[in-house]
Amino acid sequence: MQSLKDEYHLPMITNRIRSILRSFSIAALLLFGMTAFPVMAQDAMTSVPQTWQMLDYLATDYAGAVKDGAVISTSEYAEMREFTATARSRIAALQPTAATPLLLKQADTLVISVEAKAPPAQVATQAHALADALLQAYPVPTAPEHAPDLARGAMLYQNQCAACHGVTGHGDGPAGLQLSPRPVNFTDQTRADQRSALSLYEVISQGVEGTPMASYAQQLSSDDRWALAYYVGSLAYAKEAVAGADTWQHDTAARAQIADLKELSRARVAQLTPTLGAERARTIVGYVRAHPDVIQQQALAGIPLARARLAASLTAYRAGAKTQATQLALSAYLDGVEPVEPQLNARDGALRAQLETAMGAYRSALSGNTPMASVVKQADAVDGLLVRAQEVTADAAGDAAAIFLGAFTILVREGLEALLVVVALLAFLRKAARPEALRYVHAGWSLALVAGGITWAIASYAISISGAGRELTEGLSSLFAAFVLLGVGLWMHQKSIGGRWQAYLKEKMAAALNRRSAWFLFGLAFISVYREVFESILFYAALWNDGQEVWLLGGIAAGAAVLGLIAWVLLRTSRRLPIGTFFSASSALIAVLAIVLTGKGIAALQEAGWVAVGVAPVPHIELLGIYPTWQSLLAQLTILVLLAVGFVFNIRRGRQPSASATTTKEVLPDAE
């Protein structure tokens, strides 16, 4: 009885994994939706901007309520307490995401600070940090689609705002003198330093509850509200707007702070002061707000942007602003290096890998209490690699051979892992004589290709998928696939021992390949293929702009042909293998893929800034998912240990007599 029980019931660890895995087909689609294209409920689309506005207002006005640990305005302080409590409850009511626990922790910290009457600088820093994290977790539009028209903004101001805020923005308009509280003085630099153009846009759009400031969302279009926000935001920096042209033209470190309209709309003088100093920050913000069109004409991009932000991060670290230094270093990679990775990878893949590791190690150094001399040494090393990368990519555009080889290499490298998973699934179903389940696997990988096409369309025409979003999608989907393959590998290995595959085929196939398991196969095929398609399609979108479309398509076609040939060879070979040997080979292959994907998943999360980087003295072998970082190696070692324990457990169980296996052998003598 015991051997019969062992035969028809999986070992505890494998059984647990299988029960979890069968429910993950839907999770695969959810993962795709949440990481690649976040979709928020309609209430979040309004709640997030309102909550962000509360936090921004708190950061600016808290100084008018508390000073030196004492309340100086009872009504203002009561409003600050109300805003923190409301913001916290609004965040808790949003659709949960992976960032929700951290958001709530930050919100609780802010509530405690306000209750303790903490210094205004501390509260402002915490409120802005929470506001930024909120927008990262729940992306909403934070910038105009094109440079705002400040002449239009000036006209709107005189028509809509001057009566209260005054003709020159001093808060002394005839109607405003009768209001309580009095209208804001837009020329007050101390207050303006805490405000961004986005802050002003949200105030114009949402109004301010409890004040005479009403919402203009119905009266003014979005373009008009942005024009008005930019104009109002420039009033405190009138002199800087005139004198800032030279700084913008020649101060690379200052230009590195603002690369596009999104960053300009969220830029605050107080945020840039640790890196640039108050005077330079006011000059650059004042000039670019008054002339937003220069962003699209003269902003840094690519490797020059990466080098400038690397230098800015070092300056911020010297000033003691570790958080800002780390953010600038992360931006140097995501906004500067990653957009040119396809060109760099096509010309010098080893340099690209070396640069990724070095920049990750530099970010980790910034996060710790690393001595200044060591940080400077690492920054110099990274900058040297960036100089080499700039030289390599300078003439990469238009190089037909590089484009062809790049397109070919990307498809073969990224597609091989997905191909192996899909082929293993197809071969297994054919060996098991279950052709009706093949359509689920084919539907999975086919839908993944369609989803890849949608990704390309969205990335090209609808939204810009950020570097962080891309790395998170790759990292999380890789780890998900690795977890699934871990369970599948252990299960297949168990069935390859002691004839258990025969009992499985005879007694368990009908139950194992029910509708729920078929959808599991669909989910595994989808996520395995989509994670590769997602990365490849964004690479191709970047290479498409190099003017060598024919060579790019030729490289893709050649890569597809090679993958097709590999698939044909693998499927034919698998048909000739005895079932026991097939299960053994498949379990080994899938175990290797689980280890590879684990390494790649951790590496992607490191590039997104989610996981620290500790450099390890090992070679970089991307094909095997081996990266020279302790974090990725330890994660792979963990998977390897789990596999080893599972395999040993299976082997020991396989040595026990199996009555059911013997019975099955008699019934199916020609199974092998």
Image (cartoon, grey):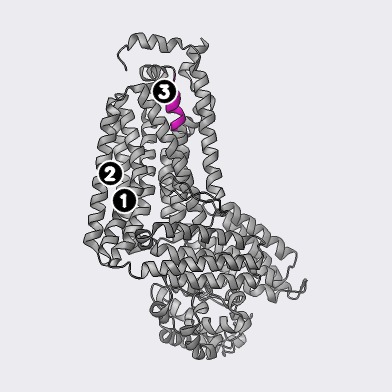
Q: Which mark is residue 411?
A: 1
Looking at marks 2 and 1 on the same chain, the residue that comes earlier in the sequence is marked by 1
Specify the quadrant that holds the C terminus: top left
The Cα atoms of the two marked residues, 2 and 1, are separated by 8 Å
User: 523 or 547, which is in the foreground?
Assistant: 547
Looking at marks 2 and 3 on the same chain, the residue that comes earlier in the sequence is marked by 3
Q: Quadrant of residue 514?
A: top left
Q: Are marks 2 and 1 in contact (CB under 8 Å)?
A: yes
Q: Which residues are magenta?
A: 488-497
In this rendering, position of residue 372 left or right of residue 287: right
Residue 266 at x, y percent in the picture: 51, 72
Q: What crowding class fits label 2: few (fewer than 14 Cα within 10 Å), some (14-19), or many (20 or more)?
A: some
In this rendering, position of residue 93 left or right of residue 334: right
Q: Residue at horizontal 23%, vertical 51%?
A: 557
Q: Is residue 297 visible?
A: yes
The kind of secondary structure the magenta stretch mainly shows is helix
How many numbered discs, if any?
3
Q: Residue at horizontal 52%, vertical 77%?
A: 253
Q: Is residue 608 visible?
A: no
Kindly identify which residue carries mark 2: 563
Q: Are marks 1 and 3 in contact (CB under 8 Å)?
A: no
Q: Secondary structure at mark 3?
A: loop
| Residue type highlighted by circle 1 | Leu
The Cα atoms of the two marked residues, 1 and 3, are separated by 33 Å
Q: Secondary structure at mark 2?
A: helix
Q: Please check the rendered image and state whether residue 467 is part of the magenta-colored stretch, yes or no.
A: no
Q: Which mark is residue 496?
A: 3
Q: Please check the rendered image and state whether residue 494 is part of the magenta-colored stretch, yes or no.
A: yes
